[in-house]
Amino acid sequence: MCNSLDCKGYINGARQIFTPKFQFKRQLMRILFFAPAAALLAGCSSIPAKPPQGSQATFVILETTDLHANVRSYDYYKLAPDASLGLERTATLIRQARKEFPNSLLLDNGDTIQGTALGDYQALVAPVGCGQPLAIYKAMNALGFEGGSVGNHEFNWGLDFLGQVTSSRFGADGASARVQACAGPSFPVVLANVVDARTGVPLFEPYRILEKRVTATGPDGKPLAATVKVGIIGFTTPAIMGWDKRWLEGRVRTEGWRETAQRYIPEMRAKGAEIVVAISHAGLDGAAYAPSMENGSLYLAEVPGIDALLLGHSHDVFPNPASKAAGFNLPDVDKVQGRVHGVPTVMPGLWGKHLGVIQLALRHDGKRWVADAGAAKVATRSIQLPDRSFVEPDPEIAALVKAEHEATIAYVKTPIGDTDFRMSAYFADVGDVSAIQVVNQAQADYVRRHIQANMPQYAQLPVLSMSAPFKTGAAGVADYTDVAPGKLALNNAADLYLYPNDLHAVKVDGATLKAWLEKAAGRFNTIDPARSEPQELVNPSFAGFNFDMLTDPDVRYQIDVTQPLGQRIKGLSWRGQPVRVEQEFIVATNNFRASGGGGFPGLDGSKTIFASPDNNRAVLIAYIKSVQHLSRAANGAAHSWRFAPARTKGPVIFRSAPGKLALAREAGLNFVQERGNGAYEILLDLPIN
């Protein structure tokens, strides 16, 4: 009997043709239809219920992660094509891999729907209706994705929106219940460790067992057709409960990485899963295990029964022999072969720049298919070719999302003001505040006005603001905030403030303020003044978006990079007086930081005095509209901090985009010298002008 969906579809189609309205002669009907159908049935019947013991097959798992709504190879903030990213180019790698590996399964790791102006437009400006899939899902459906999971950014716009666009019926208390499912991904979305706060039922299907037809080789060396049952299970970071507290508190809760896997993986095996793939939206962290830890993949890999582990969230590429990331250099992590506790593991970066590939070697033991972990091959494939060019985009993707793409471009061109100076992040790590000060000014102004109008108990406290350079080259030399002088539009505000955070205000004392700045100073390596060899200033494993800084003329402090972590902030003062440990401040920030994002001391949500209904980008846009004209003197030159003077025997090197020295000079950074190929030398004994 034929159990293949392909076979059933063929024969059902033939039955529809064999109706009385078709007046074919019986013999002609037999020739045209019954013969090929019979042949197909014969092929189906050749698939044994169980292949012979010793049969072998190569089965390949393909992964995308952290696409962040980058459907097209286009930068909506710069209004220009960007060949270095985009699912339309990953699509070319996917099609190539499928030709190379007939037995493959294409999965996505999450952080799929948010991250570009396109994502914002479809969620906030012109929200998609129930019958319309998101542009990213239209592309993924066309590419034949077969499964996916959920990242932290999927929750940024609430459960109702997420339920709609993923075509899900959530059991979460308060979430919308729909009579009819909406348009969404045509593949299953699985997530096991986020559950209804009241019932404990998983928000999404925790896992799915897929039946994949494969070509294999029998013990006699002859080809045969077979079926492999592949179980996929999803996990996301429990940090969502802090980052998106306003959407999730009281409605859902998260469960531990290890505990969730220990519950479901045996169940998946009992239901017939021969291969288990864990889709983990998290990186690797060697800290002691905690169920609520942000990056729990290291401990997930310890749970028996996982044959392949797909990583995400931290935007890294794994395996990577040259990586100095702390998580990739832990015991039981093989950054060369791509193993975590022996489990084949891959992470393909972000924005569609890479495709993850795990080749599993399967052998049938007479009862089921078994994966040989030692024989697996793990790699990532880049859309950038060895000659530095990029693979061509798949033209089908651009055609699919043409209307959404053009509508987004029209939207982000909306004018809001102008600037007489260039606001960029090329030298933000060494003191250029041109792309940061206006964000801090907007946040502080908003909080100050709210306190004066609604919170008189805090009216006498100084209001400060913290912000960070969100784009500092982590994804390449084009990954920097860069707003040209002239007219400002919505896309420029989105370039200055990348994330859909909400504005929060926290009340902290002087000790917490200093600890906050100490944590941010972890952006830098410890420099040894006695070393004659070149030393890298910036620690690449410390994200630029965690380098919070003040840009207030009333505040001064120095960062001494020759000192160990936690002992670098010197001379912290407010209005010329040393900041006292008990002195109180209100600090404008975002919900991510206020609720504990980044692991900053003392910031765990308990110090929040005001959670704004407005997001940080909207606050910035409103501020620019009110000011209308930005100038460097008023909005881009307030240096609260500088490096503490230090004379080093050897050069201290800073990396940025090449050929940008003039911008450093415009920002008053006279201690920067260009060395070539994007390298700059920092003379720590020279002050900022």
Image (cartoon, helix red, strand yellow):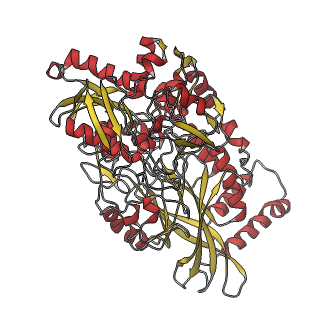
Give the total number of marks visible in the rendering. Answer: 0
Percent position of residue 231, x then y: 48, 65
Q: Is residue 440 above or below residue 364?
A: above
Q: Quadrant of residue 86?
A: top right
Q: Residue at x 22, y 15 (%)?
A: 453
Percent position of residue 229, x then y: 53, 69
Q: Nearer the viewer, residue 353 or 660?
A: 660
Q: Residue at x 62, y 45 (%)?
A: 87
Pick the quarter of the image with the N terminus.
bottom right
Percent position of residue 179, x then y: 41, 39
Q: Residue at x 33, y 65 (%)?
A: 258
The answer to whether residue 3 is seen in the rendering is no
Q: Nearer the viewer, residue 440 or 511?
A: 511
Residue 144 falls left or right of residue 96: left
Residue 286 falls left or right of residue 585: right
Residue 95 falls left or right of residue 576: right
The answer to whether residue 43 is seen in the rendering is yes
Percent position of residue 433, x then y: 45, 29
Q: Nearer the viewer, residue 573 or 79?
A: 573
Q: Is residue 590 above or below residue 655?
A: above
